[in-house]
Image (spheres, rainbow, N blue to C red):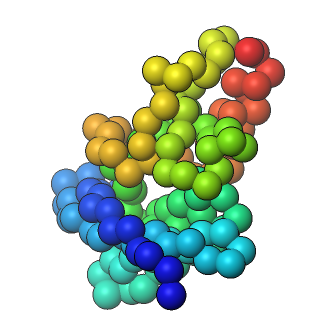
C-alpha cells in the first residue's frame, strides 16, 4: 500500500449553511494517479484520477451531491492547477485578466472562508474564461 495523507476539512451543509462538521479526507497515490476518500453521514466516498486536483474535484462533486460544500481553497471558483503541479496538492488562485504568479499558489486543503461552492463544470468554465483573457 502507499502512504496516506490525512487532511481536515470543514464541510458545511448547503441547505441551511449553519450546520458545519469537520471531516477527514485521505489522499493516496495509486498506480494510475491518486485516490481521495472520506465519509460523510456514514456514507463512504472515494474518487480516483490521474491528477491530484482532478481527483479532489471528483471527490468534492460527490460531496456536493450529498449536500455539503468544502470550505477549502480547492472549492474556490478560481482554483486552477497547472500540468506541472498535477502530482501535488498545490493550485493557483487566478484572476481574470491576470497571469498566474508564484504568489498565487496555495494548498488545496487550506481553509477558505467561502460562501459559494461551485462544481467541477463551473470551475472549468471559469478556467476557460481566464485562459481566454490572459
* Residue drawn at point x = 65 percent, y = 50 percent: 86
* Residue drawn at point x = 43 percent, y = 36 percent: 106
> As displayed, is residue 74 above or below residue 54?
above
* Residue drawn at point x = 53 percent, y = 67 percent: 59
> As displayed, is residue 70 above or below residue 98?
below
Number of marks in picture: 0
- Kindly give the residue lying farthest to the front in the view shown: 2
Q: Is residue 44 left or right of residue 51?
A: left
Q: Nearer the viewer, residue 47 or 105?
A: 105
Quadrant of the image occupied by residue 100? top right
> As displayed, is residue 54 above or below residue 36?
above
Q: Quadrant of the C terminus?
A: top right
* Residue drawn at point x = 39 percent, y = 86 percent: 43
Q: Nearer the viewer, residue 101 or 16?
A: 101
Residue 25 in sight from this viewpoint: yes
Q: Nearer the viewer, residue 57 or 82?
A: 82
Residue 10 lies, in percent from the top left, at: 26, 57
Residue 15 in sight from this viewpoint: no
Residue 30 lies, in percent from the top left, at: 61, 77
Q: Is residue 4 left or right of residue 128?
A: left
Residue 16 lies, in percent from the top left, at: 27, 56
- Kindly give the residue lying farthest to the right in the view shown: 132
Residue 78 lies, in percent from the top left, at: 55, 33
Q: Is residue 125 left or right of residue 85?
A: right
Q: Nearer the viewer, residue 7 or 60?
A: 7
Amino acid at each position: 500500500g502507499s502512504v496516506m495523507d490525512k487532511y481536515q476539512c470543514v464541510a458545511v451543509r448547503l441547505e441551511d449553511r449553519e450546520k458545519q462538521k469537520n471531516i477527514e479526507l485521505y489522499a493516496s497515490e495509486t498506480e494510475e494517479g491518486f485516490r481521495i476518500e472520506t465519509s460523510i453521514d456514514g456514507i463512504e466516498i472515494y474518487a480516483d484520477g490521474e491528477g491530484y486536483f482532478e481527483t479532489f474535484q471528483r471527490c468534492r462533486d460527490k460531496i456536493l451531491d450529498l449536500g455539503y460544500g468544502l470550505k477549502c481553497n480547492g472549492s474556490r471558483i478560481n482554483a486552477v492547477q497547472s500540468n506541472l503541479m498535477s502530482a501535488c496538492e498545490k493550485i493557483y488562485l487566478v484572476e481574470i485578466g491576470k497571469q498566474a504568479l508564484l504568489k498565487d499558489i496555495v494548498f488545496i486543503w487550506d481553509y477558505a472562508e467561502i460562501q459559494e461552492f461551485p462544481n467541477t463544470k463551473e470551475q472549468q468554465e471559469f478556467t476557460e474564461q481566464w485562459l481566454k483573457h490572459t
